[in-house]
């Protein structure tokens, strides 16, 4: 009986229904007329509009059935009656959760059913402060009339759906589940971020980027740890402590802004440390860190150095996962670390 579940309109907070409705109609009409296409021609782009149109059509058809049989009931609130019939007495909150709509929407539905004497309120047996909705004798009599109608309606819809190549209900269920795991808005914004990531360029160290190198790393350190004395020494003079010792520093540039950095430092044993990687919080999610790492790894591969390593902290789970995917393996550290926060050592050993 999922076809009977009512999907109440939920509008943006503070936006009158008629404003949202006419703006939507204007936008859709403009696109259709400009491109001389129908909603059907636009495919998945207006899936929500088509589902809404189909939903309204089915509701109207069921209302015609009720009216022809002198049944005083709106198809849009049938779902509430059905749940009370199937599961017994329930609170407004329980019904709202089951239907996936708002508490006020269920409250409005219940008021109509109470007016028609199909439903009544009664105290919760364990808490007098709470109320339960329950079917009245009239409501139960109505249910007895509705059950045969629901059976016939279900049979008709099954016949209509069986003529399609795919299962509509299964497709809708799958779409609902996927939207729960990652909503449409999240997916669209993620795709936009990925497109933006293509515009991120990597540039080598320039003296004018020295302040950005310190800014980005201090921002990251103060978020997760604190700036240690060794950090401050290196970040305050990257030319002396990294570049002049044979190391290199790279920067991620997006639309003229320096948004990320990474460094390759040579130590006393001529090992190369991948370090000082930071991406400003505003641009996290563009996979800038991964892009910087891949660039730095390629620079290491093209050099004469034979060992690339990094140090990190076990708290930084997402970063460690990225290191592992990039080919870094956990190892016991051969020397003591410059950093008090470091409790993890990894070496680059790609499969």
Image (cartoon, rainbow, N blue to C red):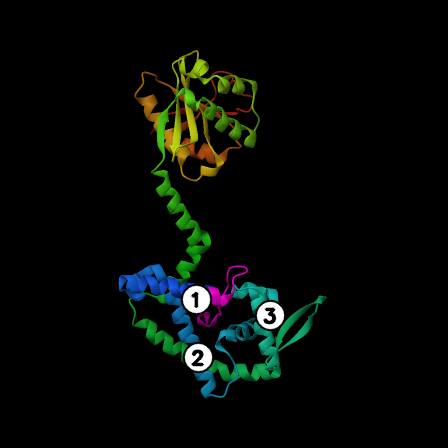
- Between the residue at mark 1 and the residue at mark 2, the CA separation in whole angstroms equals 26 Å
At x 61%, y 67%, the residue is 92
Q: Which residue is drawn at 61% across and 80% down?
A: 115
Q: Nearer the viewer, residue 55 or 10?
A: 10
- Reading the image, the residue beneath label 1 is 22
CA distance for labels 3 and 1 = 27 Å
Q: Earlier in the sequence, mark 2 or mark 3?
A: 2
Q: Give the range drawn in magenta.
A: 1-19
Q: What element carries label 2?
A: helix
> Disc 2, disc 3: CB below 8 Å?
no
- The rendered magenta stretch, by its main secondary structure, is classed as loop
- Badge 1 marks a residue whose secondary structure is helix
Which picture quadrant has residue 238? Answer: top left
Residue 16 covered by magenta stretch:
yes
Residue at point 35% right, 28% down?
295
- The residue labelled by disc 2 is 62
Q: Which of marks 1 and 2 is nearer the N terminus?
A: 1
- Compared to residue 193, the image places residue 52 above or below, namely below
**Residue 253 seen in render:** yes
Q: For this view, does 250 lie left or right of residue 37? A: right
Q: Earlier in the sequence, mark 3 or mark 1?
A: 1
Left or right for 124, reference 20: right
Q: How crowded is mark 2: few (under 14 residues within 10 Å), some or many (20 or more)?
A: many
Q: Name the residue under label 3.
A: 107
The picture quadrant where one finds residue 265 is top left
Q: Where is residue 109 in the image (x, y as percent from the top left)?
A: 56, 73
As drawn, which residue projects farthest toward the top? 268
For mark 1, does the 10 Å Cα neighbourhood hold few (<14), some (14 to 19), or many (20 or more) residues?
Answer: few
Residue 90: image location, x then y, percent: 61, 69
Front tag of 3 and 1: 1
């Amino acid at each position: 009986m999922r076809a009977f579940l009512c999907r109440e309109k939920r509008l943006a907070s503070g936006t009158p229904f008629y404003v949202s409705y006419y703006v939507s109609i204007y936008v859709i009409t403009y696109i259709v007329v400009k491109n001389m296409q129908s909603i059907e021609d636009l495919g998945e782009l207006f899936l929500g509009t088509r589902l809404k149109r189909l939903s309204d059509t089915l509701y109207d058809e069921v209302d015609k059935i009720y009216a022809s049989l002198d049944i005083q009931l709106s198809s849009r609130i049938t779902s509430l009656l059905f749940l009370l019939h199937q599961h017994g007495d329930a609170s407004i909150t329980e019904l709202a959760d089951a239907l996936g709509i708002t508490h006020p929407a269920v409250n409005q539905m219940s008021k109509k059913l109470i007016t028609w004497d199909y439903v009544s309120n009664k105290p919760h047996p364990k808490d007098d402060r709470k109320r339960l909705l329950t079917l009245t004798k009239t409501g139960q009599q109505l249910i007895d009339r509705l059950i045969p109608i629901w059976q016939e309606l279900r049979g008709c819809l099954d016949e209509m759906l069986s003529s399609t190549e795919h299962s509509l209900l299964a497709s809708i269920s799958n779409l609902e589940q996927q939207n729960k795991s990652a909503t449409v808005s999240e997916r669209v914004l993620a795709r936009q971020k990925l497109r933006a990531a293509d515009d991120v360029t990597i540039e080598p160290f320039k003296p004018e980027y020295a302040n950005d190198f310190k800014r980005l790393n201090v921002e990251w350190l103060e978020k997760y740890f604190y700036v240690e004395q060794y950090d401050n020494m290196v970040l305050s003079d990257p030319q002396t402590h990294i570049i002049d010792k044979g190391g290199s520093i790279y920067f991620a540039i997006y639309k003229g802004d320096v948004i990320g950095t990474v460094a390759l430092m040579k130590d006393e044993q001529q090992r190369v440390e991948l370090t000082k990687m930071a991406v400003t919080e505003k641009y996290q999610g563009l996979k800038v860190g991964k892009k910087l790492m891949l660039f730095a790894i390629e620079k290491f591969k093209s050099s004469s150095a034979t060992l690339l390593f990094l140090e990190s902290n076990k708290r930084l789970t997402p970063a460690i996962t990225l290191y592992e995917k990039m080919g870094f393996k956990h190892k016991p550290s051969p020397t003591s670390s410059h950093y008090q926060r470091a409790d993890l050592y990894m070496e680059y050993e790609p499969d």
